[in-house]
Amino acid sequence: MFRRMDHVALSVQDMESAITFYCDLIGFEKVFDRTFDEPMARLIGEPGTAVRIVHLRLGEAVLELFDYQHPPGRPRRPDARQSDFGLTHIGFMVDDFTATLEHLQSQGVTLVGEPVEIRPGVHVAYFYGVEGEVCEIREILPEAQ
């Protein structure tokens, strides 16, 4: 039986930039870094697979980064929208929404839209990660819980 969600995975074009973004900007810690070949080839059904996998941890959450040498990845659709089917964003809870948002913007992070109080006491903003993935920051104030 299922016990809990374990991790979210992201295939990246530039592993070092992704590690820097998630560790230096958001606060993850790199806890695993290994290259896989034949077992991964069997797992995904692609002979000749070679992939570097890095695990980043933030609290109990793990972000698993994949950098495929083979098979080559395909770029994200340039017209991708939040309403498209599939994974839409990686969400992070924050303690100080305004300060976190200001920090992200001071580091050149681009927002998807504008920050919103989605319901009383719940502040949300979407921003683009280093690979174009959408991330979310959210603060739920005590009176909204």
Image (cartoon, helix red, strand yellow):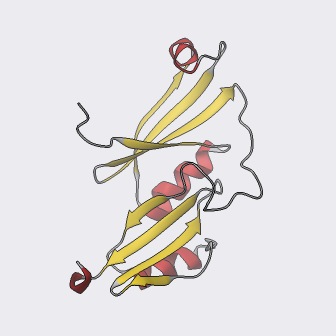
Choose top left, top right, bottom left or bottom right for residue 67: top right
The image position of residue 5, as x and y in percent, is 32, 43
The image position of residue 111, as x and y in percent, is 61, 74
Residue found at x 57% / y 61%: 134
Choose top left, top right, bottom left or bottom right for residue 74: top right
Rendered view: 27 above or below 126: above
- 100 relative to 73 in the view: left or right: left
Rendered view: 109 above or below 96: above
The image position of residue 36, as x and y in percent, is 53, 21
Choose top left, top right, bottom left or bottom right for residue 145: bottom left
Q: Nearer the viewer, residue 29 or 80?
A: 80
Give the total number of marks visible in the rendering: 0
In which quadrant will I find the N terminus?
top left
The image position of residue 139, as x and y in percent, is 35, 76
- 14 relative to 90 in the view: left or right: right
Q: Nearer the viewer, residue 138 or 80?
A: 80
Residue found at x 48% / y 37%: 54
- 88 relative to 47 in the view: left or right: left
Rendered view: 16 above or below 36: below
- 129 relative to 136 in the view: left or right: right
Residue found at x 56% / y 36%: 66
Residue found at x 70% / y 25%: 71
Residue at far right of view: 78
